[in-house]
Image: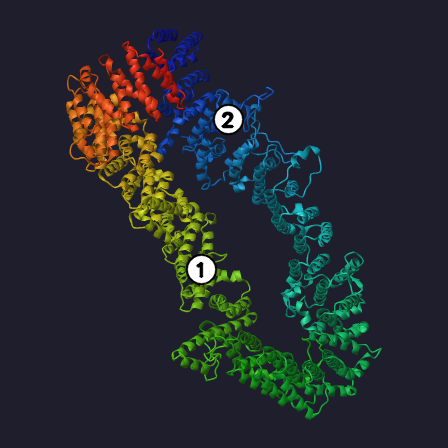
């Protein structure tokens, strides 16, 4: 059969299909084969196909439920061999058929439909994509089977269909709500982020309303984040959704994005490029503000068709995308895209403040992450311009077209960001600033005017930070900078002047004259901080230089670059001085204008002097003024050279100093002038003739130092100036002046005479003419006129003796020695007089003919034993040196001209040399510390001056022994002196002696071995003040005093304890002394010392941290001298140092433990502990032990060490530090840190907790292997954050359950807010199935055991978090967890039970169905078998939690769950759990009736179980439940069920009356009302007898309930035996007299009467015979009731009358109408209650209606009376009453 015939037959079959079912079968069979025939070559076949399809289309459009063969159609789409013509037709039917499918079928077909996208032409994809998206809402991903879903959809792979789908979803999420595609002019406009093509694809075929679009976006967002896609590909979608304007959409995306953004790496180039493309659009335009052409962005697509050109996204989405973009770190740097985006954010048309801030942050990233491969030079000027504008310095001046871009004012936050940008720009592209002096000018201008203090501080810091850029600036730029700085140097803004100091210091070299001058001006600033900074900048680099450095290699290398040239500096200062004097900057002082103030002058001259001595070859040392003679003699050759070259510089310097001394005669200025003149007096002294009067006046100054230096300068000028004979004039007037001047003047004159006569003697001139003056001076020593005069005389005698100018008489020599010896020790005089007297004694030995040298030496040794002052000991040492050489000693020469290192001919040893050495060596072993100190100092002085003499060589061994003994002194100074002495001995000794010396020192340093000391009564054991005063008030220092103290305290053993303490102190002294020796020997030993470094360095390193300050300072100084490079040395010997510290960390000496702790803190700083990692756990454990030391200082040191180690530990375990290193460190350190969490020591626990948290955060995903021990430890530590008082308060609240529960819940909530819990929760993202199981088991063990409440609560909450974040991993142990948590529901603590219930609610998500069913059955059993309210409350909370967190699970087990919920809803009215049960019912059940109908069997079953329970309240609850079933279902309730319920209730009604049995009676009536009784089968007597029996039993409440039920049952059964009912109620309504006489509760009786009357009304039968029989009796009861005065009985009676009237056959009682109307009419007129009036009118209305129905009429009087009453009531305020009045009036009027 050919194709035409087949198609004709198919058409015929389709046409003859009479039903939709037949048509659907035919379509399923023939639709696809028919479509495939479109590929036929015969035109007739194709036309026939179209005819068939047209017919089908007409039939199918009118039948929307007709299903198409969608599986076949989709498979056809996927096949590649089908033509596009066929596929187009298939697509049409796919679009038609897909919406007709049910939700489940759509979901099943969805994967195939998505995969077909890549085979569908682009233009045809839109409709299919819309269909796909519409079905997303039906996709419910089961996270437990996520892998199966992934395999099913295949959306996590790289394929075209995934790309197409994600692009469509992205466009849909970008689509604004309610967007109109046509603009106001009729032209098409596009929303941000769209192209014409993308907009038409999303909104072309589908017109979305706002609600529909929101729903679609929600479905798309849920589908995308469900886990089916690769997370990297959906980050943009999630961010766009998070920025959505509808909360419902943004909230879905936010929860997902917040979770993944913190745990993912975003260094993905494809993602970054996609973000750029979105933000910039397809064809971004370069901002006009960007001054340079940078080309087109890389991330935009090339050669796009116009309809596919996208616009940039809106600013709201852009704000959300930029943080995501910045997470890409260095991947963000894609040029020039980033510049396009930055300028768009800052200057874009629709930009905002937040976007500008984000743009600046992006610019920071650009500069921070840029490397050498990125050339910023081209754009750097433009970036600088942008930055300066944002800081607020740049006002736009240029093209008016660009002014709009600069029309905003940056806020302070943006300005601070711009400062950061400027700092980064300076580092990455310093060239852009190097020659831009205007930039600094603008910044300084901005700083000067800035009102905001915080921003000004930031701006100052930035200016200082960019200063290094200008170091390489051109000379022109630096000249401009100097000009700018000169302008601002006098600014009133302190910040400006302060930053200028920094700029000058950094930019200009130290040899730059102008720059140094600016700093000199700042040194005199009125602000102390600025002045100090300037002084530090000028003199700081020079403070490390002394005169001893002038011969070192360093000095030779650096001296030319330390200070500017002397000549240039001085000339520039003179030039500036003249300029300032002639300008407004001049200062008026003493009738003249000067260029600088005193402070500035002082620093200028000080710096000029440093430049002078530096150029002279000494180096710029600052201590020049301390030793004028030494400096002057050293600079003399340089000055002589200047003079020979006829330089004017020296004259200018002298003039400047002279002027300064005249203006500001201070000590420093005079000293500087003295040094200059004293160096070349023969050339310069003559120029100071005019200054002689001033100098004479200065010799009378109040300052003794000023008098002394002025006198010396005066003597130089007087001696060298011979033309006017000033010398003779001065000396001639000397004696008269001594009698006339003041005390200060006399002293100054004596100073001058001594200096002048000494210079005369040095010139070998005759001084005999002045012998009277000399005698007078000597006499002044004996007169004791005034201490100042005595001091001056002693100084003069000393100068005369030094210069050999005294007369030689033997008698006077001895007397003079004795007198000077007395003056040197006399307590009456000052230390200065003592010093001058001792020096004078030494100078006496320089006289050629002095014969009392031995006497002089003995006196000096005597003085040495008596004085204790160190300075005097040095003076004694110098004097003894003079005695060693006698008249040939160099000290007798001119000190102004001879250098210290110049060789002097003729120096010979005196005969007293050996005697002096013997006495000093003997004294070095003295028991008196001061004598040992003096002898050590004297030996050092002699060794320095006479080291190469023959006598010293002979005594060298003994001197070495003396120094070695003194190394064990407790006095640091003595140790230092001894070490220096040993250093000199090392220099003078042969090689074998040197090695022996080093070995001895090493032995002492390591072992602490020391000399034995013979202890006598006077032996000094402790220094004064060490042990405090004795009971008698004296100090305890000697052995004798120590024994006396022990005897006074009656503790003889105290002596041994103190001696042990002293022994330990001496041990440390000997070690420290040995270290001093090493320090001094280090420069001499060189590489030989390195052999003992492995032993020496660890000891010395630890000793540096000794708690005793003097030991610590000494050891630090020694370390500095021994070790050249600290870092390199410690790195080399780190292991040895670590072992030494570890060994001593737990020493029995507290000072050792403390020093070890501090040493360990320093050891690991900056270098880590990789080298000793294996030993670190035990080391850290010991540190933690020491944190609990008995001594507070040791505890603090251990805490400091622990914190330092922790800091290094966190850096080492950082995930960026390297995977292997971090994992290894964590492996070793986590166990010991977690051990510390169990410590009872508060500080240890806190430290270990912080350490654990920090390590977890820094490790990132690498923490996973350690989580099984970390998480339980963190959870157990939450209790530490809670005060123990909280437990006490909770216990005290035990009798207030509600308050206690609220309090404990707050405790658990607070525990969850602790960092411990938050960290534990943070780590859950790194868990796998195996570790999850271990952790959950550990948490469950915590819950089961006796742990604090916060710990248990947090354990349960953490399991809840696991159920949310790691459901798949938790599933294997979910059953165990449920079992433990269910047990926990019986916990005594209400808050814990609530927490466990919430956790169970989360757990059921991953639990098996059997476990859930078991849980629900157990809850049901508990509820039915336990009488405790707390257990029932826990059951409610558990069901409620399941309903809240996993309602689907509860619906799946609704039969078991909802039956329990329904039962729980019907508890006692005061039961607090009822609201919870009702809420669950409302959420889960499909309405009350629907829920009962669906789960009737389960509800009936549980209600029967409750009804048969042993607990009476539960029985009542079951009965109430059954009553609710009957009330809700009514007649719809199955008869079998009704009878089943009825039988159960009948059984329960038997027995005694118990509390709550009323519910059984009520339910009994409710169930009977549901039953349709057949009167022919039963008249209901059995049931009525049962209820009538109950009326006679029980208390009032029970009777009342039984009466009410009786009326309802009688009405339901249409019970004809009314006599039974009326007999039961009559005694209640009309109580017998004997009961009236009894005292009964009237309220109870009233309530019973009301119920009885209502029961009569309900039970009134419809049977006419019964009505006739009991009417009169009934009326009697009604009349009795209505006559009652209580309105409630009246109301009940009227209502009962109303019910009676409704069933009353009035034809039988026509004559009784008046009686029936009597009381209603009466109440209508007299009642006060609205309800009584309303019911009375209803009764009247019923009677009138009944009368009208039987053609009876009211008489006119009664009718008018009723109308009148009704009309009166119609004016009432009650709306209901007014309506009823209108109705009754209409009835009465006919």
Numbered circle sitting on residue 257 = none
For residue 1199, the mark is 1
Identity of the residue drawn at 38% across and 56% down:
1236
Instruction: Pick whichever of labels 1 and 2 is earlier in the sequence.
Output: 2
Residue 318: percent from the left, percent from the top? 54, 34
Mark 1 vs mark 2: in front: 2
Where is residue 542 shown, x and y percent of the image?
65, 64
Mark 2, Cα crowd under 10 Å, few <14 / some 14-19 / many 20+, is some
Per the image, label 2 sits on a secondary structure element best described as loop
Pinpoint residue 301: horizontal percent, then vertical percent: 56, 30
- Between 1284 and 551, the one lying in front of the other is 1284
Instruction: Please give the name of the residue rendered at 76% of the width and 75% of the height, measured from the top-left corner.
Output: 697
From the viewer's perspective, is residue 426 above or below residue 1555? below
Establish if 44 lies above or below 997: above
Residue bearing mark 2: 177
Q: Which quadrant of the view contains residue 1527?
A: top left
Q: With 1176 as the anchor, is 478 left or right in this view? A: right
């Amino acid at each position: 059969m050919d194709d035409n015939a087949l198609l004709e037959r198919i058409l015929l079959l389709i046409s003859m299909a009479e039903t939709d079912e037949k048509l659907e079968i035919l379509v399923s069979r023939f639709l696809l084969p028919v479509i495939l025939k479109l590929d036929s070559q015969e035109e007739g076949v194709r036309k026939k196909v179209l005819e068939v399809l047209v017919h089908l289309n007409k039939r199918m459009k009118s039948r929307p439920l007709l299903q198409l063969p969608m599986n076949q159609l989709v498979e056809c789409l996927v096949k590649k061999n089908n033509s596009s013509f066929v596929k187009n037709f298939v697509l049409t039917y796919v679009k038609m058929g897909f919406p007709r499918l049910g939700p489940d079928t759509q979901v099943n077909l969805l994967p195939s439909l998505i995969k077909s996208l890549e085979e569908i032409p682009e233009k045809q994809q839109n409709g299919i994509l819309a269909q796909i998206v519409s079905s997303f809402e039906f996709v419910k991903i089961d996270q437990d089977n996520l892998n199966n879903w992934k395999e099913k959809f295949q959306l996590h792979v790289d394929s075209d269909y995934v790309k197409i789908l994600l692009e469509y979803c992205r466009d849909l999420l970008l689509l604004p709500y309610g967007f109109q595609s046509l603009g106001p002019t009729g032209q098409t406009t596009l929303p941000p982020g769209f192209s014409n093509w993308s907009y038409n694809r999303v909104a072309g075929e589908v017109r979305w309303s706002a609600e529909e679009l929101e729903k679609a976006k929600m479905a798309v967002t849920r589908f995308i984040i469900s886990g089916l896609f690769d997370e990297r590909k959906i980050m943009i979608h999630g961010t766009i959704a998070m920025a959505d304007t509808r909360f419902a959409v943004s909230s879905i995306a936010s929860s997902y994005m917040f979770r993944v953004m913190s745990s993912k790496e975003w260094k993905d180039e494809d993602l970054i490029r996609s973000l750029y493309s979105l933000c910039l659009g397809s064809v971004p335009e370069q901002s006009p503000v960007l001054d340079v052409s940078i080309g087109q962005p890389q991330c935009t697509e090339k050669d796009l068709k116009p309809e596919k050109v996208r616009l940039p996204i809106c600013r709201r989405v852009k704000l959300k995308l930029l943080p995501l973009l910045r997470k890409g770190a260095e991947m963000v740097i894609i040029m020039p895209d980033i510049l396009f985006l930055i300028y768009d954010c800052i200057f874009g048309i629709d930009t905002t403040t937040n976007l500008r801030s984000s743009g600046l942050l992006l610019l920071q990233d650009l500069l921070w992450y840029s490397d050498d491969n990125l050339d910023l030079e081209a754009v750097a000027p433009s970036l600088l311009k942008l930055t300066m504008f944002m800081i607020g310095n740049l006002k736009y001046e240029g093209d008016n077209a660009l002014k709009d871009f600069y029309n905003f004012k940056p806020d302070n936050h943006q300005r601070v960001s711009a400062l950061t940008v400027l700092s980064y720009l300076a580092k990455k592209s310093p060239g852009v600033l190097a020659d831009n002096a205007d930039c600094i000018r603008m910044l300084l201008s901005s700083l000067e005017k800035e009102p905001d203090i915080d921003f000004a501080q930031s701006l100052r810091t930035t200016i200082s930070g960019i200063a290094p850029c200008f170091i390489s600036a051109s000379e022109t730029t630096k000249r401009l900078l100097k000009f700018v700085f000169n302008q601002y140097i006098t600014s009133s803004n302190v910040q400006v002047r302060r930053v200028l100091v920094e700029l000058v210091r950094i930019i200009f070299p130290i040899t730059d004259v102008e720059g140094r001058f600016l700093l000199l001006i700042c040194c005199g600033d009125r602000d102390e901080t600025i002045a100090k900074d300037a002084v530090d900048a000028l003199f700081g680099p020079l403070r490390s230089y002394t005169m001893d450095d002038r011969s070192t290699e360093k000095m030779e290398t650096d001296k030319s670059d330390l200070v500017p040239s002397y000549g240039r500096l001085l000339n520039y200062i003179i030039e500036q001085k003249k300029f300032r004097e002639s300008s407004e900057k001049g200062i008026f002082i003493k009738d003249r204008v000067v260029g600088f103030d005193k402070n500035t002058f002082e620093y200028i001259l000080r710096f000029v002097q440093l430049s002078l001595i530096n150029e002279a070859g000494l180096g710029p040392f600052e201590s020049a003024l301390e030793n004028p003679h030494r400096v002057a003699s050293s600079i003399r050759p340089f000055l002589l050279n200047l003079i020979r070259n006829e330089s004017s510089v020296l004259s200018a310097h002298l003039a400047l100093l002279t002027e300064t001394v005249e203006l500001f005669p201070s000590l420093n200025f005079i000293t500087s002038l003295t040094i200059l003149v004293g160096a070349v007096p023969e050339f310069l002294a003559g120029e100071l003739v005019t200054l002689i009067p001033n100098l004479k006046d200065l010799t009378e100054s109040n300052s003794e130092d000023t008098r002394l230096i002025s006198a010396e300068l005066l003597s130089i000028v007087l001696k060298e100036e011979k033309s006017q004979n000033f010398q003779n004039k001065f000396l001639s007037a000397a004696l008269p002046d001594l009698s006339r001047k003041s005390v200060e003047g006399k002293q100054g004159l004596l100073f001058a005479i001594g200096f002048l006569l000494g210079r005369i003697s040095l010139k070998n001139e005759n001084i005999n003419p002045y012998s009277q003056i000399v005698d007078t001076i000597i006499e002044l020593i004996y007169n004791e006129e005034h201490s100042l005069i005595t001091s001056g005389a002693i100084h003069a005698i000393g100068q005369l003796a030094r210069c050999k100018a005294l007369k030689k008489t033997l008698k006077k020599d001895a007397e003079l020695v004795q007198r000077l010896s007395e003056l040197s020790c006399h307590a009456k005089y000052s230390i200065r007089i003592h010093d001058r007297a001792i020096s004078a004694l030494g100078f006496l030995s320089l006289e050629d003919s002095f014969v009392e040298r031995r006497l002089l030496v003995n006196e000096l040794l005597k003085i040495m034993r008596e004085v204790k002052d160190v300075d005097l000991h040095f003076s004694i040492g110098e004097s003894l040196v003079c005695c060693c050489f006698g008249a040939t000693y160099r000290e007798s020469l001119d000190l102004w001209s001879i250098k210290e290192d110049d060789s002097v001919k003729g120096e010979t040893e005196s005969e007293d040399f050996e005697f002096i050495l013997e006495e000093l060596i003997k004294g070095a072993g003295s028991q008196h510390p001061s004598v040992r100190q003096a002898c050590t100092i004297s030996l050092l002085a002699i060794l320095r001056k006479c080291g190469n003499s023959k006598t010293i060589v002979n005594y060298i061994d003994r001197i070495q022994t003396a120094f070695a003994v003194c190394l064990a002194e407790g006095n640091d100074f003595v140790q230092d002196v001894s070490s220096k002495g040993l250093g000199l001995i090392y220099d003078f000794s042969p090689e074998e002696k040197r090695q022996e010396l080093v070995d001895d020192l090493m032995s002492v340093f390591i072992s602490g071995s020391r000399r034995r000391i013979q202890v006598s009564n006077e032996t000094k054991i402790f220094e004064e003040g060490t042990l405090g005063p004795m009971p008698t008030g004296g100090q305890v220092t000697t052995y004798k005093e120590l024994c006396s103290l022990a005897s006074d305290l009656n503790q003889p053993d105290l002596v041994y304890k103190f001696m042990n303490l002293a022994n330990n102190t001496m041990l440390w002294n000997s070690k420290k002394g040995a270290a001093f020796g090493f320090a001094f020997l280090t420069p001499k030993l060189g590489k030989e010392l390195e052999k003992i470094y492995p032993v020496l360095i660890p000891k010395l390193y630890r000793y540096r941290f000794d708690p005793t300050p003097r030991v610590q300072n000494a050891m630090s100084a020694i370390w500095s001298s021994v070790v050249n490079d600290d870092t390199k040395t410690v790195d080399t010997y780190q292991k040895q140092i670590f072992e030494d510290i570890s060994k001593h960390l737990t020493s029995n000496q507290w000072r050792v433990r403390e020093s070890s702790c501090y040493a360990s803190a320093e050891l690991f700083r900056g270098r880590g502990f990789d080298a000793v990692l294996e030993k670190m756990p035990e080391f850290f454990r010991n540190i933690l032990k020491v944190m609990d030391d008995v001594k507070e200082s040791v505890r603090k040191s251990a805490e400091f060490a622990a914190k330092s180690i922790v800091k290094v530990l966190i850096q080492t375990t950082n995930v960026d530090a390297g995977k292997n290193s971090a994992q290894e460190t964590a492996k070793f350190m986590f166990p010991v840190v977690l051990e510390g969490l169990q410590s009872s020591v508060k500080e240890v626990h806190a430290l270990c907790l912080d350490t654990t948290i920090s390590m977890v955060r820094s490790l990132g995903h690498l923490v996973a292997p350690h989580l099984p021990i970390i998480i339980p430890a963190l959870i157990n530590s939450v209790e530490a954050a809670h005060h123990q008082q909280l437990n006490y308060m909770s216990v005290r609240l035990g009798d207030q359950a509600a308050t206690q529960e609220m309090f404990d819940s707050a405790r658990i909530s607070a525990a969850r807010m602790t960092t411990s819990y938050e960290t534990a929760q943070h780590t859950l993202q790194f868990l796998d199935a195996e570790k999850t199981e271990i952790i959950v088991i550990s948490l469950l063990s915590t819950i089961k055991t006796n742990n604090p409440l916060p710990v248990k609560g947090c354990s349960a909450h953490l399991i809840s978090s696991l159920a949310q974040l790691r459901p798949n991993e938790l599933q294997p142990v979910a059953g165990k967890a449920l079992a433990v948590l269910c047990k926990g529901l019986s916990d005594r603590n209400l808050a814990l039970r609530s927490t466990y219930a919430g956790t169970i609610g989360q757990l059921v998500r991953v639990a098996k169905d059997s476990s859930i069913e078991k849980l629900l059955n157990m809850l049901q059993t508990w509820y039915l078998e336990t009488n405790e309210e707390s257990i029932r409350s826990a059951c409610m909370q558990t069901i409620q939690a399941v309903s809240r967190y996993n309602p689907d699970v509860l619906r799946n087990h609704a039969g078991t769950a909802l039956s329990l919920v329904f039962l729980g809803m019907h508890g006692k009215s005061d039961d607090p759990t009822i609201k919870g049960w009702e809420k669950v019912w409302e959420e889960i059940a499909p309405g009350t009736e629907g829920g009962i109908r669906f789960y009737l069997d389960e509800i009936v079953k549980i209600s029967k179980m409750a009804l048969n329970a042993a607990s009476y309240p539960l029985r009542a609850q079951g009965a109430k439940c059954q009553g609710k079933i009957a009330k809700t279902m009514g007649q719809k309730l199955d008869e079998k069920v009704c009878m089943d319920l009825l039988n159960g209730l009948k059984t329960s009604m038997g027995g005694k009356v118990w509390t709550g049995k009323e519910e059984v009676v009520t339910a009994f009536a409710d169930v009977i009302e549901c039953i349709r009784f057949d009167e022919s089968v039963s008249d209901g007597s059995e049931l009525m007898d049962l209820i009538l029996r109950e009326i006679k039993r029980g208390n009032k409440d029970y009777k009342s309930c039984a009466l009410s039920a009786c009326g309802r049952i009688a009405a339901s059964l249409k019970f004809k035996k009314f006599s039974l009912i009326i007999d039961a109620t009559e005694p209640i309504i009309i109580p017998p007299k004997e009961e009236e006489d009894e005292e009964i509760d009237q309220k109870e009786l009233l309530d019973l009467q009301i119920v009885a009357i209502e029961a009569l009304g309900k039970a009134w039968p419809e049977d006419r015979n019964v009505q006739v029989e009991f009417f009169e009796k009934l009326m009697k009861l009604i009349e009795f009731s209505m006559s009652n005065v209580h309105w409630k009985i009246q109301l009940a009676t009227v209502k009962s009358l109303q019910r009676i009237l409704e069933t009353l056959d009035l034809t039988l009682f026509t004559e009784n109408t008046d009686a029936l109307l009597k009381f209603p009419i009466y109440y209508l007129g007299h009642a006060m209650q609205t309800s009584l009036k309303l019911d009375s009118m209803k009764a009247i209305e019923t009677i009138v209606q009944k009368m009208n129905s039987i053609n009876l009429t009211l008489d006119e009087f009664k009718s008018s009376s009723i109308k009148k009453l009704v009309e009166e009531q119609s004016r009432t305020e009650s709306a209901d009453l007014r309506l009823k009045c209108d109705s009754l009036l209409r009835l009465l009027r006919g």
